[in-house]
Image: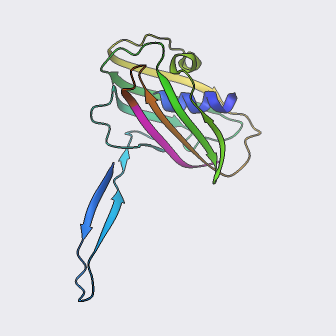
Amino acid sequence: MKLLSSAAALLCLAPLSVTASPHTLFSSSQVTLKEAFPVDGNNPLEYCTNPDGDVLSIKSVDLSPNPPKAGQTLTIQAEGTIHKRIEKGAYVLLEVKYGLITLLRQKPDLCDQIVNVDLECPLEEGTMSLTKEVELPAQIPPGKYTVHADVYTKDDERITCLDARNIQF
């Protein structure tokens, strides 16, 4: 549950096709690259796809320490704008991996999770800022972790989608 709370705290706050024309006599090929959409601030977060049109526009997320350290307090500071009221029934498609091993794959109710960062539903339109301290357990096994959170309203409209890749403990 502590890992879920930490992941929710981190995350509460597109593919692009490129055609490459090699100058060879034998063939041409098409290469698909994934365009990066980093979240502003001192953090390991990236948007899964272009965030234009998402219900939540994240201005910045700062983590201290970055990267997080087992047994220490993680301080999260985030700012953003909610463009549409978020009500009970909003949900998160959450996946946490340790290397290639999936530790957690859940679909928790967003409103049940945001109480861990001292928020509650409904979340009204407007700007908001958040500062939260999370005690990370000392027993987090060393290794690389990946967190993916795809967040939707009760009407299946994307709130945001975030990835934190290769978080080293």
Q: Is residue 68 above or below residue 124?
A: below
Foreground residue among 38 and 55: 55
Say if 10 sits above or below 145 in the image. above
Q: Main secondary structure of the magenta part?
A: strand
Q: Nearer the viewer, residue 10 or 29?
A: 29
Residue at 26%, 78% (x, y): give it.
Answer: 28
For the N terminus, give its image quadrant: top right
Q: What residue appears at the point 32 percent right and 37 percent down from the top-left corner?
A: 51
Query: How far across and how far down the image is residue 100, in percent?
Result: 63, 54
Residue 42 on the magenta segment: no
Task: Residue at 27% x, 83% y: name it.
Answer: 27
Q: Nearer the viewer, residue 154 or 85?
A: 154
Q: Pick out the residue farthest to the bottom.
A: 25
Front residue of 3/65: it is 3
> Residue drawn at (41%, 43%), measured in percent from left and top?
48
Residue 43 at least partly seen: no
- Residue 161 falls within the magenta-colored stretch: yes
Quadrant for residue 94, please give it: top right
Q: Residue furthest right?
A: 139
- Which percent across, then down, holds residue 44? 48, 44
Q: Quadrant of residue 30?
A: bottom left
Relative side of 74 to 25, left or right: right
Residue 57 at x, y percent in the picture: 33, 29
Query: What residue range appears in magenta?
Result: 160-169
Residue 154 visible? The answer is: yes
121 lies above or below 64: above
Q: Is residue 153 placed above or below 123 in the rendered structure?
A: below
